[in-house]
Amino acid sequence: MSYELSEQLDQIVLHTGNYTLGWSTDSGALVHLQRHGSPNVLGHGPAIAGVDVALSGPANWITAKTFARYLWHRVSADENQVVMTVFVGLGPLKIFDHYRIACDAITRWIEIENVSGDDLRLYGVRLIVPHARVGTSARCRFEAPGNSVRPRLPLEIAATQDRNVLPRRFFAPGLRGGSAFEPAPTQGAGVMALYDNELPLTLLCWYAGDDEAALPYVQGHCDTVSLAYEVAVTGWLRSDQRLAAGPQHIVLTTQPWPAALAIYRALTPLPQPPAAWLRDAVLYVADLRQHGGADGLCTRLPELATLGVDTLCLLPWHPVGERPHLIGDLERIDPACGDESELHHLIATAHHHGMRVLLDVAMQGCAPDSRYLSEHPEWFARDDAGAFAIGIPPDAPAAARHPGVALPPGGYHFDWTRSDWRLYWQQWVIEHIDRFALDGLRIVSPYNAAPAWIRRPPLRASAGTALMAQAVNEIAALRPHVAILCTLSGPRSAQFASGWFDYPSHHMLIHLAMRRITPAEWCAYQADYAELYPATYRIGFLEMHDTADCNPLADGLRGSRLAQALWAVMLLSGLTPAIWNGQETADRDLLPRLLALWRREPALRHGAIEWQALGAIPADVLAIRRTLGERSLVGVVNLGALPCRFIATQRLGADVLGLFPISRERRGMGEELRLSAFGVYCFEG
């Protein structure tokens, strides 16, 4: 690939076939990025570093005490790409900041070298794209699909965000773990974007590291935002030793939003296709202890089969701690769950009813009364002083503090860098698959393994995260007939899982119920989310084993009219339904009819989606059209607590649900519909 390189007073400028890039000769940060014929989108603010590192503690970022210094640069090329390396001095570190430019995509990764004479303790890395704005500030929009960020967000709102201040509700309707963003690529895609569709021009940025997750964030300044990723890399860095982090992808394209997300999909291939059966499934997640054991749930199987359930997900039946996924003893069956013969009978009966049976497999941690703490203390993560890592370790980076990784007080973290622990865990899982004729697993895993600070070169303290995924991948290879679902919902999960429980959508669904987002915003959120991954990966739910921790209101909605409306929104939006432990007993009216309609109408499961399909409708009303071949259905949900009416300009057929009162009257070229409060309807198109 041909290029031209020039040195100006304040920048090193690189011209390639598609891009012009510039790096500051002060800080070494990327401060200029433009496509030929389009405006520059970076560097619209005061100089800041493009890389930062935390040493000696998770809050001790080097740039808070000293400046990043540009040292020199190096460029190389072949017929397919140009690689620019910018060398930056950062306190006791030398940073090798690499940029690979190949056609439309820029791939960035860094190497960190300890040039001091002492060993250094590393607590995190930040990769920053400084002061971005696309087009005019009035027209520029910020997007972060698959997070808690409100869609179609004006740049002026994103620019008010501060890394050290909790986001306000007009930026994110609600937070998870104190953040509007999901760690990537574990729980989220990590995509952040700025665009001006009138140009059109879109700046995409995301993090795709295999070793550690990164927590995205934005830092606003005037009418710009810096796009950043805080990578949860931890470990000892010896003198003259190097450590790599990345990659981060940066793309500037003339495609409008959300069509530009096709570039993300092309650069983020999902190795594991979604399970073919998952799109048609109805899941039931059960804790045997709450059903009187295996025999108690067995007596309910005919009722669940009539409801449409075809997949059982069973929480662990071994002894657990206060929470169902804190391991007590893998070798025993909790008497509250029954005995081995009762478990065999439950699974055989479920198979007789045509149900798959999946077992929850915990990877999060250990209960404080577990025998493993005394019998195998070497299996547990330790801090640098040698003490057990319990709950949320005080030295954990931000991405490791997010819900799903943070154990409850008293929970002990396993050290996944220990090959003997991984082998024991894998053998236990495989033995249970074979012994109980299981059809699949639901992997309940943390976003990041807790740092294991006992020095073990060449592994770094955060190496356990990648080894967890490797352990599950090896099980999938040994038992390829076994279906694997996951409680994470990012692209890394697709390495081993053929479907995942969609926590980001659950979170936004509850905020739809709380009127923190509108039906139109829910539709925009889901439309963007569908551009990231095939919708068939995603399982929707209103309650789950941990919603009391991360979304307490979800459990309080059970059986309400609002919960009925949310079930309808979830199914109409194409999410595979998962029922949690007794929800079906609280809603004996709408839920059975919705699930019967889901089973009866392939258009609801496989049809194309048209969001807000009826044109100008009231703010509290959601309308989704599902079309498959000649069959068209229009779902209409009134999420308001009062009746409402509007004129549908498109012809609608009969209401196939027939559960809520409705009045219809011709009005000129349209039809006036009068909907009940929290009314749910499904019209033939």
Image: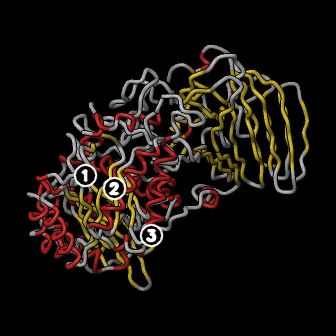
Mark 3 or mark 1, earlier in chain: 1
Q: Please identify the residue farthest to the bottom as the structure is shown.
A: 630
Q: Foreground: 256 or 423?
A: 423
- Mark 2, Cα crowd under 10 Å, few <14 / some 14-19 / many 20+, is few
Amino acid tagged 2: Trp
Label 3 element class:
loop
Q: Is residue 347 left or right of residue 387?
A: left
Q: Looking at the image, is 326 positioned above or below residue 299?
A: above
- Disc 3 from disc 1: Cα separation: 24 Å
Amino acid tagged 3: Pro
Label 1 element class:
loop
Q: Which x, y percent locates residue 296?
A: 9, 63
Q: Which x, y percent locates residue 21?
A: 79, 40
Query: Would you name the residue on which mark 3 appears?
Result: 480
Query: Would you name the residue on which mark 2 appears?
Result: 428
Q: Which x, y percent locates residue 358?
A: 29, 64
Mark 2 or mark 1, earlier in chain: 1
Q: Foreground: 674 or 186?
A: 186
**Marks 1 and 2: in contact by CB < 8 Å?**
yes
- Disc 2 from disc 3: Cα separation: 17 Å
Q: Foreground: 90 or 158?
A: 90
- Which of the image's four quarters has the C terminus? bottom left
Query: Would you name the residue on which mark 1 appears?
Result: 331
Q: Is residue 222 left or right of residue 480?
A: right
Amino acid tagged 1: Glu
